[in-house]
Structure formats: structure tokens, C-alpha cells
Image (cartoon, helix red, strand yellow):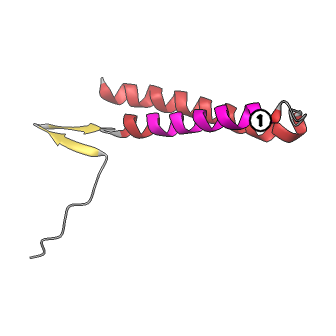
Amino acid sequence: MSTAAPIASPLERSDSYLRAGVGLMSFAAVGFIGYVLGLAVALPAHYPNGFDTIGHLGLIYLATTIFVVSALLSLRALGETRS
């Protein structure tokens, strides 16, 4: 018989049911805060130097839009699993 450590899982057994998404909200919050802080530092540096064109920052605007939409969809899905 092996005494290996159990594998980490996003499912947690609580009494007689499984809860999905335990601890995932904190991971999502840390990721979102890190992304926002990165933008808060990087974007203002572009405007005084004339790099605020859509050609230069267009991809980060697109990536931010995709990130925000996916974060909102994930938040909605995690909210549904909690209720």
C-alpha cells in the first residue's frame, strides 16, 4: 500500500456533497488584480511619449476586452456553482 499524498482537486467533500470551485475565487481575484495593476503601470507610460495609437496599443485593448469578458463569464459560472 502506498502512502502518497492526495492529489489536489478543485472539488472539496463537505459532509455529504461535493462543492466545486472551492478556493477558485481567490485565484481569480489575484489574477484579475495583477492584470489591472500591470495595466495601471504600463498604459500611462505610453501617453506622454506618443505611443497611444491603436496600432501600438490595439492588441492590449483587444486582450483586455477578452480578459474582462472571460472574467465576467467565469464569475457568473462560479456564482452558479456556489448556490
Name the residue at the bottom extreme. 1
Q: Secondary structure at mark 1?
A: helix
Q: Looking at the picture, how far across and down is residue 2, in whole percent?
A: 13, 75
Q: Is 67 above or below relative to 76?
A: below
Q: Which residue is mark 1?
A: 45
Q: Main secondary structure of the magenta part?
A: helix
> Relative to residue 44, is residue 6 depicted above or below?
below
Q: Which residue is rendered at x = 81% and y = 35% of the image?
A: 46
Which residue is at the front of the view, 66 or 36? 36
Q: How many marks?
A: 1
Quadrant in which the N terminus appears: bottom left
Q: Is residue 6 above or below residue 3?
A: above
- Does the rendering let one see residue 61? no
Residue range highlighted in magenta? 29-45
Instruction: Tell me which residue sits at (38%, 36%) in the image.
Output: 26
Front position in the image: 48 or 55: 48
Quadrant position of residue 29? top left
